[in-house]
Amino acid sequence: MVLSANDKSNVKSIFSKISSHAEEYGAETLERMFTTYPQTKTYFPHFDLHHGSAQVKAHGKKVAAALIEAANHIDDIAGALSKLSDLHAQKLRVDPVNFKLLGQCFMVVVAIHHPSALTPEIHASLDKFLCAVGNVLTSKYR
Amino acid sequence: MTLTQAEKATVVTIWAKVATQADAIGAESLERLFSSYPQTKTYFPHFDLSQGSAQLRGHGSKVMNAIGEAVKHIDDIRGALAKLSELHAYILRVDPVNFKLLSHCILCSVAARYPSDFTPEVHAAWDKFLSSVSSVLTEKYR
């Protein structure tokens, strides 16, 4: 799946709107994911997963930063996330299905906070982008 | 996800054997698909899906021919299956999840017929290869 020029500009446009709240959205995304898909908690036995947890906030910040990095290097997501890709392949080994779940929760968060910005076209481009990120992060699994 | 040289060689080697029974394997894979995952029949309202049906055999052959093409051009599966990719994107629109199911059924058929050849390494290489084929066939969907 390839991002068209239109997709890329849509992604950059939505990210310019959300980047000032990225950390907050990252944390909210995780919280929603843990609530809606409790099986995802399996990867965080070492975390306090209560609402407002400092660890979830910090981790949300990391996730958001990675997404912003990818959006900023949208012509070479694989290059930009190469280290993260290695990390997921060799250490974290998060089952690929969970990237979809995280992506969906992120979309929901964006939809809630920027309802008018998330038009069907932007939604489609953002979804494609999140899939591309997920693919990069699982590309070295085998 | 890319195939290593070793994996490509493995796929080509096992294909040489599979090709000798390609039509039978194709028909059997489809039969397995329709029995284990009846929802897949939705794409074939125009077919007689009873065991041994001529349409099943014909279609099984088509599927295996396409796989054979992909093996022959294993360094450029995208190029080899470009037309099929467009067919699936613009006309057939088979839900991507079904490619996993069909791939799984093909694996089972091959494993059943070549049990001693189907070592874990061969299994992994084939699975990766069929995943690549599936990716190519769904990459133009959006």
Image (cartoon, coloured by chain):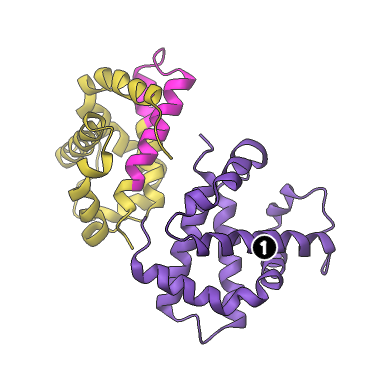
Chain colours: A purple, B yellow
- In the rendered view, would you say A131 is above or below B133? below
* Relative side of A130 to B134, left or right: right
* Relative side of A12 to A30, left or right: left
Where the N terminus of chain A falls, by quadrant?
Answer: bottom left
Say which residue appears at 28% left-offset and 33% top-offset.
B75
Q: What's the magenta region?
A: B107-135
Say which residue appears at 33% left-offset and 54% top-offset.
B139
Residue B110 % position (x, y): 35, 24
- In terms of depth relative to the viewer, which is nearer, B4 or B31? B4
Overall secondary structure of the magenta stretch?
helix
- The quadrant holding residue B67 is top left
Kindly identify the amino acid type of the residue bearing the numbered disc 1: Met
Please say whether residue A90 is one of the residues in the magenta stretch. Answer: no
Please say whether residue B133 is one of the residues in the magenta stretch. Answer: yes
* Relative side of B112 to A68, left or right: left
Q: Which residue is mark 1?
A: A33
- In terms of depth relative to the viewer, which is nearer, A10 or B97? A10
